Image (cartoon, rainbow, N blue to C red):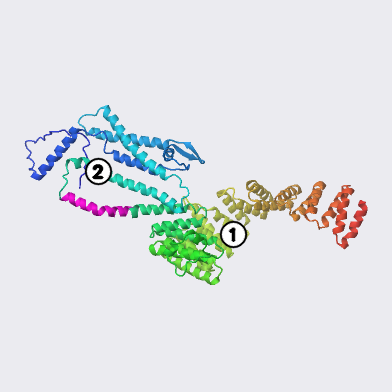
Amino acid sequence: MYWAQPSPFAAVASGEVEETLPDEEPAPAPSRRRGRSNRRERQSSSRRSLHGAPALPAFVMIDLLIFFTFVFIYSTNSQGLNSSFSILWNSITKRMIAGEPVNSPSLLFLMLFTWLIGATLGLAQTSLSRERAPDAGWWLRGYGLHALVVWGGWFIYGMIQGSRLIPLTGADLTAQLENVAGHFAVYTWLVVVWVLGAGIVFAWPYLRERIDFGGRRVLIGGAAALLLTPLIFWFITTVNIGLVRADIIYKQGQQFDSQSNWISSIELYRRALQARTTEDHYMLFLGRALLEQAKQITEEGAFSLGADPTLHDVLELNPNQVSQMSRAELLRAAEVVLKEAQRVNPLNTDHTANLARLYRTWADLTDDPAVRQTKLDESLAAYEMAVTLSPNAAHLWNERGNAYLAANMQDKAEEAYLKSLEIDNLFAQTYLLLADLYDRDQEYAKMIEMLRKGIDIMNAHPRLKPTAQMYNYLAVALSRTGDIPGAIEASLKVLELQPGDLGAMRNLMLLYRDADQPDKAIETGQQILALAGTDNPQLVLQIRQLLLELYNATDQPEQAALQMEAMRQLNPNDVNLLRMLAAQYQKLGDAARQIEVLQTLVALDPNNFEYPLELARLLQQQGQNAQALPYAQRALELAPEDQKAAINTLLEQLQ
């Protein structure tokens, strides 16, 4: 209705007269109606100029909205406080570091600076509309009123928001979600009220001076307001607030995904979808959560969806029912949700691809060969549609190849991988999938050719480089074809890209051993032991066994004994290891350690006559007949008949 018009930026002098040059013709006389309008505008402008500008600029409404927004985006309660004022104040003066609050008034300074700039600009613009410059009192009064409105509005809304952030004790999930999702609703309606207030403030001078309350235009405007206001409020509630409310609930569900708490994720995604039943994005995540829950279930469940379930049936599930569903029922529920997502948005490739992944997983989880084949067929059909919708999506061709591989269709799988490579020859995943396929079929020549070609292509790219996994596969293929130097070179590239990769270092150690370079193999093994520490005992034991083999091969008995002692610490009850250790100490001539190891063997295997017999002979050699006698007697008790004569001879010697 053009009620709100921009006010003059500078003062307009009254009584201005336009001069007409002699050679100019006078302007045409305006119409009578236009003349009245011009006179009214001049009178209004003159009155505004003479009366002076108010001390509080109209722009204060914009600054008030900024401070309302400060409350909404900055108010948090990470400390779990129970006071609205403490929550509001700590939100702008403290921050959390390592779980502890520390002073940090940066946000407070930001707000003070924003207020100072906003007040100064607003007052400066208002002062320019006066005929005379205002005095200092006017400026002080303006700053005071501006601060009262802006900081007062911030404090009132801040106390309301602070009370909403106080932790709810004893509240159920519904109440908690309503509280969290309601923050945006409160802010939205506050903005709606602000819009109405700001409109009145900006239009007030013209409402006071120009509008006669009556007439056709006002009646039309009023009638339109009566009709449109309910519609606008309904639209704000269902679209703006409803969509954000559903999204907040959906975001709450995502935090449980990292914890693999799929029951909670399902419940929150279900509630988000109930709030926006046409949002296919929520369907995607609900279907995924149901699928992940199905992977964790092994036993049969007590709750069934019934025949031909619908999305409504799934949305009516509660957490207790979900926890009682079997794997098959969870998979059926996921299928219902993902099919509905595909129906709502059929051209979104993600939904078709997710259905394909669901059927593929279903096939992997079932023990029934017929069901497995059926689901693989459905997965392949869905992938066919997915690559039709997005024919240049290389990852979908790779997934399709994986499905073919699961169906034992190696040729089709290779064809899909090669198609992916044709689309994007810089996609490292494709090279790895092809390498795994060729490795499985022992086609090492094709594997080497493909990987070297991919490595060359990526090395030629200005930004992308070959991955460590590509070099690792190349090293495996080269070693299996007998090209040990080439395999060593590829393994060194792996370690260049991934320093400290224990698996790659182990492979390099084996390659050095096979290349008859024991010194380098031993050096690599020692590096692995230094990096592995105590976090990977299985790898450490394996490396020590390799080092023991290398020390024995290079005739280093002392080092071999040290490795066996270290292995003994990892597995102190390994009888075979202790026997080897006893033999090693015998080779070194270390009788004391040999005796200690044999005594341990006697304790671990008390029914074996060989250990006490060997111990008795060793003690006899050391001149310790008295200590040897009980071991010889024990050996005689345990020994078979054909060994007793020799043991009796030993006993006679000891006695």
Q: Position of residue 142 (x, y in %)?
A: 28, 32
Does residue 134 appear left or right of residue 249 in this picture?
Answer: left
Q: Which residues are magenta?
A: 216-236
Q: Position of residue 542 (x, y in %)?
A: 67, 53
**Circle 2 residue:** 200
When the figure is inspected, residue 488 is found, relative to residue 84, above or below; the finding is: below
Does residue 215 appear left or right of residue 562 in this picture?
Answer: left
Main SS class of the magenta portion in the image: helix
Q: Secondary structure at mark 1?
A: helix
Q: Mark 1 or mark 2: which is in front? A: 2
Q: Secondary structure at mark 2?
A: helix
When the figure is inspected, residue 216 is found, relative to residue 377, above or below; the finding is: above
Count of marks, rendered view: 2
The answer to whether one can see residue 386 in this image is: no
Nearer-N-terminus badge (1/2): 2
Q: Residue furthest top?
A: 136
* Residue at left offset 27%, top offset 34%: 123
Q: Which mark is residue 477?
A: 1
Q: Position of residue 235 (x, y in %)?
A: 31, 54
Q: CA distance from mark 1 to mark 2?
A: 78 Å
* Residue at left offset 20%, top offset 48%: 1
* 642 vs 208, nearest the viewer: 208
What amino acid is found at the position of numbered circle 2 in the picture?
Ile
* 587 vs 305, nearest the viewer: 305
Q: Residue furthest bottom?
A: 370
Q: Would residue 235 be counted in the magenta stretch?
A: yes
What amino acid is found at the position of numbered circle 1 in the picture?
Ala
Q: Residues within 10 Å of mark 2 (few under 14, many from 20)?
A: some
Q: Quadrant of residue 339?
A: bottom left
Q: Position of residue 640 (x, y in %)?
A: 86, 62
Q: Would residue 196 be counted in the magenta stretch?
A: no
